[in-house]
Image (spheres, helix red, strand yellow):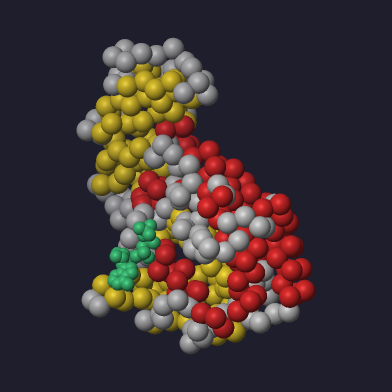
Amino acid sequence: MAELELSGVSKVYGAFNALRDVSLQIADGEFAVFVGPSGCGKSTLLRLIAGLDPVSGGRIAIGGNDMTARQAGQRPVAMVFQNYALYPHMSVFENIAFPLQMERRTKDDIKREVSRAAEIVQLSTRLQDRPAKLSGGQRQRVAIARAIVRKPGIFLMDEPLSNLDAALRMEMRAELTQLHRRLGSTMVYVTHDQLEAMTMADRIVVLNGGRVEQVGAPMELYHNPANLFVAGFIGSPPMNFAAARVDAVEGHAARLTVEGLGSFAVSYDGKEVSAGDAVTIGIRPEAMLPGAGEAGHLSFRMTPETVERLGLHTIVHAPVGAKTFTALFNGDPRMARGSALDVSVPLAQLHLFDRNGAGRSI
Ligand code: ATP
């Protein structure tokens, strides 16, 4: 069993808190993705799990065993780095075999394990080549094969696709998902790319400023972001936000005045907002529909500043109140820069964030 448990993990560099009180449980066989903006602490957290850096506080357990004081080599993990860290003077075979050589395994043993790993990453025909002869994606697969031969309980991957071009990244995303399915191992994957997180993760851990903002399945974070940060980070193009005021709360309804959108009532079953509160309304670009809506919709008019036609979608940027909203429409609807456009949003798809930025369902 290779479940991972972090309890109150913190890391300080001098006076700087890189990680604060991180507690998490990642199940055996789960594909967990740490995502967040540059500097949020995701690589640091991975290095602490790998044992490459000591924790400043807290506890790390793998498979129920306390690993906090163990050296990197004594933890059941294998790390795959962003720059692949291959040895250029060694063949693919020798690169993959390297961890086994270090363990002084027999020649037959090494040959068998390398062949198995090379087959899994589909490099069986390239074992005699030097890394310089391989493409970026193939080099990344060598690095993964070198992790596979160690048979780790947990694979740790730090932005493994960030050196690849967009097309290859998409291909490798699918390959890594299949690899995870085939191996059934626990994987902890770090990226700053929310698209990678959304497409590969069983569960996403959103980090910001050294803290965990939310943990959940991709669609859970998309539909029910816990706060403004997660709402703005998950989803592309990002959610639109508008400042709003609560005019009244009566029973299960709240009347709001939203900057640039006027006043309207929403059904609201929480208790966290009261009349007079300054709140924020969130609208996903894809929740906006062309044309005036019927009852149950928020309808407004906006004048596009730019219209980007992508074939499958059309992206429109338009001023709404003090903000510029982004709308994502299906297909290629008729609309033009400078021509006013009716837009509607089902009220049930609005997001409401209270005065502290915490997300509430409407
Ligand atoms: P990126 O996506 O840019 O790699 P990250 O989320 O992985 O970002 P970390 O590399 O974990 O971020 O760094 C978190 C914070 O800790 C950053 O502000 C960084 O400058 C700081 N930090 C990391 N390592 C050290 C170190 N050895 N000494 C001092 N500060 C450090």
User: Toward the viewer: 206 or 200?
Assistant: 200
Say which quadrant the N terminus sits in: bottom right
Reply above or below: 205 against 60. Answer: above
Say which quadrant the C terminus sits in: top left
Q: Kindly tell me whether residue 239 is visible in this rendering.
A: yes
Viewed as shown, does residue 80 lie left or right of 358? right
User: Toward the viewer: 227 or 131?
Assistant: 131
- At 24% from the left and 30% from the top, the residue drawn is 321
Viewed as shown, does residue 147 lie left or right of 340? right
User: Toward the viewer: 151 or 96?
Assistant: 96
Using the rendered view, name the quadrant where residue 149 is placed.
Answer: bottom right
- At 40% from the left and 48% from the top, the residue drawn is 233
- At 50% from the left and 51% from the top, the residue drawn is 161
User: Toward the viewer: 91 or 356?
Assistant: 91
- At 43% from the left and 20% from the top, the residue drawn is 309
Q: Kindly tell me whether residue 298 is visible in this rendering.
A: no
Image location (x, y in percent) of residue 96? 63, 65
Image location (x, y in percent) of residue 305? 29, 21
Viewed as shown, does residue 83 lie left or right of 148? left
Image location (x, y in percent) of residue 43? 42, 65
Image location (x, y in percent) of residue 77? 58, 73
Furthest residue in direction bottom, as rendered: 69
Reply above or below: 339 against 6. Answer: above
Viewed as shown, does residue 236 lie left or right of 325? right
Using the rendered view, name the quadrant where residue 37 is placed.
Answer: bottom left
